Image (cartoon, rainbow, N blue to C red):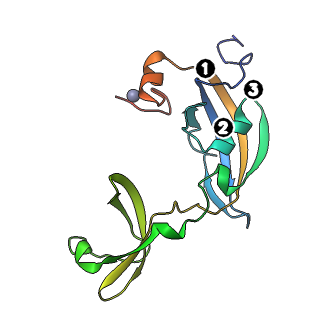
């Protein structure tokens, strides 16, 4: 029925939402897209998506298609020079084939972050802990595919279970 498919639902906090999306940068290059693959399934209102996208999705219904231009402050943040650091090479001795562009997990102040190797000198390696899309204004084309209530278990875990989500 229409009700089961979520036609009378709107996106609001704790709804499980499936969207098709295409993400482009300001140059119009496609960075990521779900088109031709499984839709992205997430829980609205708990920080699964970048804030700017959740904001625009709030109140939308199944079948809605829209374009959203999201500034860095509501996406992956502005580029922070303090997150670019020089680390003595000896700390990378265990990593085979270290190269520029490689992404590594690093423990920074007790927090695990993904960092990108941005230069390699004889005694030092430069790493950048900014998100690769920091500083970018993002352009999304979005279609809402389905909406349903989240289960209590999904809310407890903070992620979607079943189709398009975690299986555990
Ligand atoms: Zn779970």
Label 3 vs 2, first from the N-terminus? 2
The quarter of the picture where residue 61 lies is top right
> In the depicted view, which residue is nearer to us: 147 or 69?
69
At label 3, counting other C-alpha atoms closer than 10 Å, the crowd grade (few under 14, some 14-19, many 20 or more) is many
Quarter of the rendering occupied by the N terminus: top right
Name the residue furthest bottom.
122
Label 1 vs 2, first from the N-terminus? 2
Figure quarter occupied by ligand 1: top left
Tell me the mark number nearer the camera, choosing from 1 and 2: 2
Quarter of the rendering occupied by the C terminus: top left
Q: Is residue 67 above or below residue 89?
A: above
**Which residue lies under the disc numbered 3?**
61
**Which residue lies under the disc numbered 2?**
54
At label 1, counting other C-alpha atoms closer than 10 Å, the crowd grade (few under 14, some 14-19, many 20 or more) is some
Give the residue at x 45% y 26%: 162
**Which residue lies under the disc numbered 1?**
148
Q: Position of residue 136 (x, y in %)?
A: 66, 62
CA separation in Å, label 1 and label 3: 11 Å
Q: Is residue 145 above or below residue 92?
A: above
Give the residue at x 59% y 61%: 134
Mark number for residue 56?
none
CA separation in Å, label 1 and label 2: 16 Å
Tell me the mark number nearer the camera, choosing from 3 and 2: 2
Label 1 vs 3, first from the N-terminus? 3
CA separation in Å, label 3 and label 2: 13 Å
Name the residue furthest left.
94
Residue 104 horizontal side relative to residue 34, left or right: left
The quarter of the picture where residue 147 lies is top right
Q: Position of residue 139 (x, y in %)?
A: 72, 54
């Amino acid at each position: 029925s229409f009700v089961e498919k979520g036609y009378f639902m709107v996106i609001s906090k704790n709804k499980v939402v499936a969207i098709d999306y295409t993400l482009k940068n300001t140059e119009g290059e496609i960075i990521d897209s779900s088109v031709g693959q499984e839709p992205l399934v997430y829980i609205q209102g708990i920080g699964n998506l970048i804030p700017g996208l959740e904001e625009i999705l709030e109140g939308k219904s199944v079948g809605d298609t829209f374009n959203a231009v999201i500034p860095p402050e509501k996406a992956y943040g502005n580029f922070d020079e303090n997150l670019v650091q020089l680390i003595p090479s000896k700390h990378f001795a265990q990593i085979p084939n270290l190269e520029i562009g490689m992404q590594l997990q690093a423990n920074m102040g007790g927090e695990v972050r993904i960092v990108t190797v941005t230069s390699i000198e004889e005694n030092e390696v430069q790493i950048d802990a900014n998100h690769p899309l920091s500083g970018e204004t993002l352009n999304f084309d979005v279609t809402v595919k389905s909406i349903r209530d989240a289960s209590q278990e999904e809310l407890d875990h903070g992620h979607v279970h079943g189709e398009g989500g975690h299986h555990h």
